[in-house]
């Protein structure tokens, strides 16, 4: 039986994803008619990118599931026309990319690489950082991405303190939860990594009060979601030295406006939302597997809980 799959992304994404999706469908044994246009009542599945044109899902009455290409869900999950099951993108390529970005920047901070390689005074000054076992890294968010990043950092011998809204158990990681747990992690985190989803409960999790709990001079990495940080509070903390440096990959408004203070701040590194890009080949495999599972009556992978928002 042929299933009709609508690709609801940007026009520029179509020539990139069409061949990888067709290959993935063939490998998964899914017979699919894949197009960018269908009559809404003919669509069985929607491959969805928030950057595309589709916003009203009401006419897609036959659609069995909407399959997201992004890890983030905040731009779709509150859409009142989304009545179909929604799956977010969790794939090995995306996960590996995030681990590499986080590990690279944690090591950059841990080894003070900016100081070592950016000297212009030609002075020979030896700087010996502590060993990783003597450096505490806090990871806020222990979902799919947070947990693997925390494990990777633990594998590098860092003292990793993780926090999530509910109790978790991860080998090699000291796991905390709840309000008391958050305060405990922040009080220890010399380097803090933010990998929480954006929900009403996590917005501004890093604010004036919580930033004040960090050890003075702590460094911050945010590859998660821009609204996790109260920007004014962070700028103030950078000005006082409470926060030594911040590397930010995500922002409330993207692209980051040209007049934003982050651009010119000497203790802020801006990266253009590259911490973990969706890889078309591996993402297509996840999409194909989920359609195969749905057609076989098996549960969907990475199904989003609309009530929780992730």
Image (tube, rainbow, N blue to C red):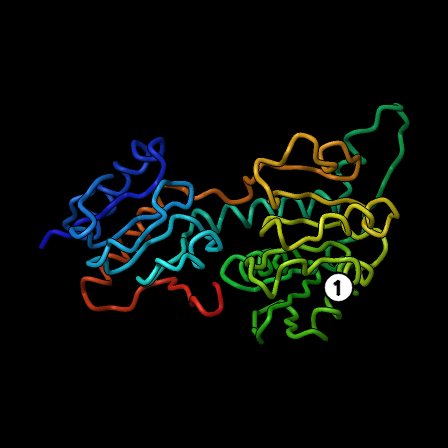
Q: Residue 74 in the image: state x and y as whole percent.
A: 49, 55
Instruction: Give me the residue at 24% from left, 39% from top.
Output: 36
Considering the numbered disc 1 on the image, is that residue within a helix, a strand or a loop?
Answer: helix
Q: Residue 261 in the image: state x and y as whole percent.
A: 74, 36
Residue 80 placement, left or right of 117? left
Say if 140 sits above or below 18 in the image.
below
Residue 265 figure quarter: top right
Residue 61 placement, left or right of 259? left
Instruction: Give me the residue at 53% from left, 59% from top.
Output: 148
In the image, farthest residue toward the left: 1
Q: Which residue is mark 1?
A: 186
Say if 303 sits above or below 114 in the image.
below
Q: How many marks?
A: 1
Q: Answer few, some or many: residues within 10 Å of disc 1's Cα (few below 14, many 20 plus, some between 14 and 19).
A: many
Q: Residue 232 in the image: state x and y as whole percent.
A: 76, 48
Residue 35 placement, left or right of 220? left
Q: Residue 289 in the image: state x and y as whole percent.
A: 27, 56
Residue 278 placement, left or right of 99? left
Residue 258 figure quarter: top right
Instruction: Give me the residue at 64% from left, 34% from top.
Output: 257
Instruction: Give me the residue at 9% from left, 55% from top.
Output: 1
Residue in the foreground of this view, choosing between 132 and 226 = 226
Say if 144 sits above or below 168 in the image.
above
């Amino acid at each position: 039986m042929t299933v009709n799959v609508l690709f609801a992304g940007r026009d520029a994404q179509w020539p990139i994803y069409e061949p990888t999706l067709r290959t993935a469908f063939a490998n998964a044994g899914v017979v699919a008619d894949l197009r960018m246009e269908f009559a809404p009542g003919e669509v069985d599945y929607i491959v969805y990118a928030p950057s595309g044109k589709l916003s009203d899902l009401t006419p897609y009455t036959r659609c069995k599931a909407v399959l997201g290409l992004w890890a983030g869900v905040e731009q779709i999950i509150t859409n009142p026309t989304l009545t179909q099951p929604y799956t977010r993108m969790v794939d090995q390529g995306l996960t590996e990319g995030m681990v590499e970005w986080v590990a690279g920047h944690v090591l950059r901070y841990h080894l003070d690489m900016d100081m070592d390689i950016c000297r212009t005074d030609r002075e020979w000054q030896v700087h010996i950082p502590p060993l990783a076992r003597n450096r505490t890294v806090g990871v806020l968010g222990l979902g799919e991405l947070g947990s693997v990043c925390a494990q990777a950092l633990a594998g590098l011998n860092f003292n990793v303190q993780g926090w999530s809204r509910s109790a978790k158990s991860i080998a090699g990681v000291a796991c905390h939860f709840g309000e008391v747990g958050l305060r405990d992690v922040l009080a220890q985190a010399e380097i803090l990594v933010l990998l929480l989803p954006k929900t009403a409960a996590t917005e501004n999790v890093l604010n004036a009060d919580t930033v004040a709990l960090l050890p003075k001079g702590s460094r911050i990495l945010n590859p998660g979601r821009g609204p996790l940080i109260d920007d004014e509070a962070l700028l103030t903390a950078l000005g006082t030295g409470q926060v030594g440096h911040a590397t930010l990959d995500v922002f409330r408004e993207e692209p980051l406006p040209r007049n934003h203070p982050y651009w010119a701040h000497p203790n802020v590194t801006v990266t253009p939302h590259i911490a973990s890009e969706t890889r078309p080949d591996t993402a297509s495999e996840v999409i194909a597997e989920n359609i195969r599972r749905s057609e076989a009556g098996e549960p969907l992978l990475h199904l989003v809980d609309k009530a929780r928002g992730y």
